[in-house]
Amino acid sequence: MLSRYRGCCQVAASSAEAARRYANGAFILPVCPGGVPPDCGGLPWSQARLVEVQQLPDPPADAVVPVGMVLALESPVAETAPQVLEVAPA
């Protein structure tokens, strides 16, 4: 309910935790002034039960991948399945 995107994405980050923060920043919906409701379990892209993180292979040496880049991929992932957050090495 807190994310405007449900699907696979790629994130250029130095760690899985950083990738989760970037994805939350890119996809989170504004919530009430009090912040994230306590009963929702926290930010969606930070929750291991909702989002699986996979490390991608290193990009070619001449590739320019900006740190913090979040790329939403078209994906037929069912809403009940864990989302996949792929971390591109920064």
Image (cartoon, grey):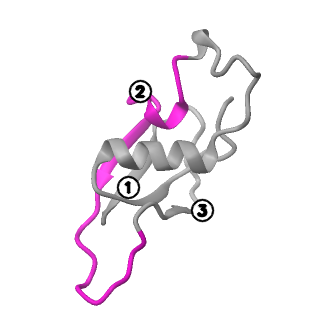
Quarter of the image containing the C terminus? Answer: bottom left
Q: Which residue is mark 1?
A: 86
Q: Give the spatial CA distance, label 3 vs label 2.
A: 21 Å
Q: Which residue is mark 2?
A: 49
Most extreme residue toward the right is: 32
Q: Which residue is mark 3?
A: 74
Q: Magenta stretch containing residue 23, yes or no?
A: no
The image shows residue 63, relative to residue 42, as above or below, that is below
Residue 3 location, x and y as percent? 64, 38
Q: Quadrant of residue 31?
A: top right
How many neighbours does mark 1 have within 10 angstroms: few (below 14), some (14-19), or many (20 or more)? many
How many neighbours does mark 2 have within 10 angstroms: few (below 14), some (14-19), or many (20 or more)? few
**At 70% across and 16% down in the image, what residue appears?**
34
Residue 9 location, x and y as percent? 49, 57
Q: Which residues are magenta?
A: 41-66
**At 28% across and 56% down in the image, what residue appears?**
14
Mark 3 or mark 1, which has the lower sequence index? 3
User: Could you tell me what secondary structure mostly forms the magenta stretch?
Assistant: loop
Residue type beneath disc 2: Arg
Left or right: where 48 falls relative to 44: left
**Viewer-side label of 3, 1:** 1
Residue 88 location, x and y as percent? 33, 63
Left or right: where 86 falls relative to 50: left
Residue type beneath disc 1: Glu
Q: Which mark is residue 47?
A: none
Compare residues 45 and 35 and report the one nearer the observer.
35
